[in-house]
Image: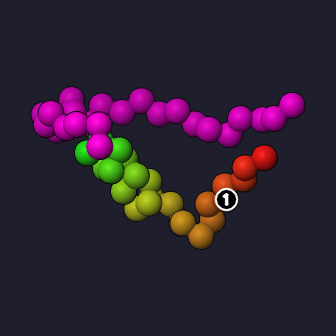
Amino acid sequence: MVESKIEIIDTRITDHWGVDWNAMEIVRDFLQNFYDANSVDKIKIEIN
């Protein structure tokens, strides 16, 4: 059995900022926030 380690987080980007962002803008902002908040050298991705 494979243990899922994916965390799903609800985001309210467009609600909080009052901006009507498209899907690409939301994804880019989310990824930038993730990069800013985490040590990239500690991220490990495994594909089975």
Residue behind mark 1 = 44
Q: Is residue 40 magenta?
A: no
Q: What stretch is highlighted in magenta?
A: 1-24
Residue 29 place in picture, x, y as percent: 31, 50
Q: Which residue is drawn at 13% across and 37% down?
A: 19
Q: What secondary structure predominates along the stretch shown in magenta?
A: loop
Characterize the local packing of mark 1: few (<14), some (14-19) or many (20 or more) Cα atoms within 10 angstroms. Answer: few
> Image check: 19 left or right of 29?
left
> Image check: 37 left or right of 1?
left
Q: Residue at x 52, y 33 (%)?
A: 8
Q: Nearer the viewer, residue 46 or 37?
A: 46
Q: Quadrant of residue 20?
A: top left
Residue 9 place in picture, x, y as percent: 47, 33
Which residue appears farthest toward the front when viewing the image? Answer: 48
Q: Is residue 22 magenta?
A: yes
Q: Quadrant of residue 43?
A: bottom right
Amino acid type for the residue under numbered disc 1:
Lys
